Amino acid sequence: MRKCIWCNKESEQIKEITVLTKNRFGVNQQERNYFVCPEHEEKFRKFNDQVRRYALLFICLVAISLLGLIGAACWTGNNSYPAAYLFIASFALVGLVAIIFPFATPETIEMMGVAKSIKVVRIIGGVIFALGATLFVLALLYG
Ligand SMILES: [Zn+2]
């Protein structure tokens, strides 16, 4: 029996649909077939449209936050405050991006379904963002 890409459950009513997707790097638009149960087709199509529309922005934001983290780690100035704030801001940005664009890797989606992958990514993003925000407040208070 086929598994639904959205809820990851097996069902006899699952149908095959074709949607436009991009690869994990946000490029190469192509058609792909997915199996989905009828009640989740609409949700999956909406999610897929969102991923297609924001994939490049998502990747840019992740790249910016990674550059920020690397920049903070490589900081060689005498004053370490800018590096600390850059690190905290970049860290919090990773969490924020994950909350706004809860896009998991294709492997994760394959494993747990879209619905669960969104929840997991949002929870991890929320924890990272909360940690970043706490660090930021602490830095302001005691920095
Ligand atoms: Zn389903």
Image: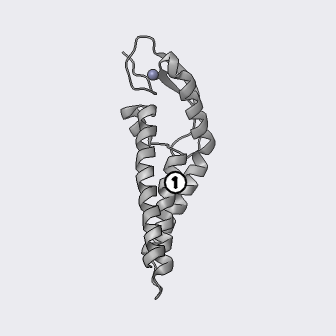
Count of number-bearing discs: 1
Q: Residue furthest bottom?
A: 78
Q: Which residue is rendered at x = 47% and y = 18% of the image?
A: 37
Question: Is 26 located above or below residue 60 in the figure?
Answer: above
Q: Which element type, helix, strand or loop, lies under badge 1?
A: helix
In the drawing, does residue 71 fall left or right of residue 55?
left
Q: Where's the N terminus, which quadrant?
A: top left
* Quarter that holds the C terminus: bottom left
Give ligand 1's quarter of the image: top left
User: In the depicted view, which residue is nearer to us: 128 or 30?
Assistant: 128
Above or below, 70 relative to 124: below
Residue hosting label 1: 96
From the top left corner, tell me how far across and down residue 55 is, in percent. Answer: 58, 45
User: 53 or 115: nearer the eye?
Assistant: 115
Residue 60, given in percent of the width and then of the height, sits at 57, 56
Q: Position of residue 78 (x, y in %)?
A: 46, 88
- Whether residue 72 appears in this view of the structure is yes
Would residue 87 appear left or right of 28 to someone viewing this image?
Answer: left
Q: Residue at x 51, y 66 (%)?
A: 89
Disc 1 residue type (three-letter)? Leu
